[in-house]
Image (cartoon, grey):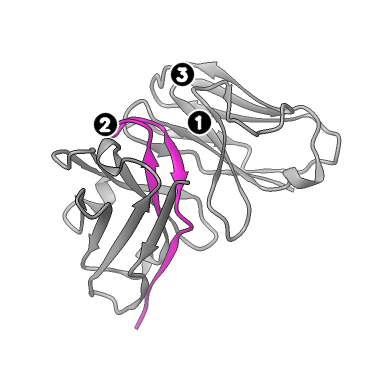
Amino acid sequence: DIQMTQSPSTLSASVGDRVTITCRASQSASTWVAWYQQKPGKAPKLLVYKASTLESGVPSRFSGSGSGTEFTLTISSLQPDDFATYYCQQYNSYWTFGQGTKVE
Amino acid sequence: EVQLVESGGGLVQPGGSLRLSCSASGFTFSSYAMHWVRQAPGKGLEYVSAITSNGRSTYYTDSFKGRFTISRDNSRNTVSLQMSSLRSEDTAVYYCVKGTEFYSDSRPDYWGQGILVTVSS
């Protein structure tokens, strides 16, 4: 099974900051990686899939990059609505999720 | 509009069983793999199980093998998760999730609202 190690687990940031979250796969996930945003009591919301493809309707301040074993989600300028928990997911071999990053 | 509505959750005693169902609408159900993902209170997302579009192939994360069984009824647009030998650690919100292809390795695109399962005496 492919394990996804996400860092950091918590990130303190301010409105306007550039934020970067990283996921490392235990073996190659190719580009079959997605990123989600989750707020309390809600289902995860898809932000990025295939490592760098922005889901329709997602603001362009979100971007994803990477391939193989290293992946990154970047928020170019943090907005008040972006304070949430973010998860990476690989779907190259079934599914595995990262442990999550809380942006506070 | 794609809708996934979970049902069957609630309170169950340790060692007990529970069957979750997910009713799907707004897409051709028989064409897509379906999945279950869970989230314990205050914890991260955990992949539980998957079933291919025709129901012939299933997958379980190691933690659930032998205790959980996924199934689907394409005539009723329903996917189910039969859970047995439940323990307190199974307390979680369980999400029904649609895949984007007939096979299990495809990415998810729609999530249900989730249903709470509480295992407690």
Q: Chain of mark 1?
A: A
Q: Quadrant of the N terminus of chain A?
A: top left
Report how far apart the C-alphas of labels 3 and 1 lie in the structure.
9 Å
Q: Mark 3 packing: few (<14 Cα in 10 Å), some, or many (20+)? A: many
| Label disc, if present, on residue A31 of the rendered structure | 3
Amino acid type at circle 2 is Tyr
Q: Chain of mark 3?
A: A
Q: Which secondary structure lies at badge 1?
A: strand
Report how far apart the C-alphas of labels 2 and 3 lie in the structure.
17 Å
Amino acid type at circle 3 is Thr
* Residue B99: % across, % down: 36, 37
| Residue farthest to the left, as pictured | B56
* Residue B92: % across, % down: 42, 63
Q: Is residue B58 left or right of residue A55?
A: left
Residue B71 in sight here: no
Q: Is residue B116 magenta?
A: yes
Q: Which sits in the foreground, A77 or B32?
A: B32
Q: Which secondary structure lies at badge 3?
A: loop
Q: Is residue A25 left or right of residue A12?
A: left
Q: Is residue A36 magenta?
A: no
Q: Is residue A61 left or right of residue B88?
A: right
Tell me the residue that label 1 is attached to.
A34
Q: Which sits in the foreground, B74 or B15?
A: B74
Report how far apart the C-alphas of labels 2 and 1 lie in the structure.
17 Å
| Label disc, if present, on residue A22 of the rendered structure | none
Q: Which secondary structure lies at badge 2?
A: loop
- The correct choice, above or below, for A20 with respect to B64 in the image is above
Tell me the residue that label 2 is attached to.
B103
Q: Which sits in the foreground, B70 or B74?
A: B74
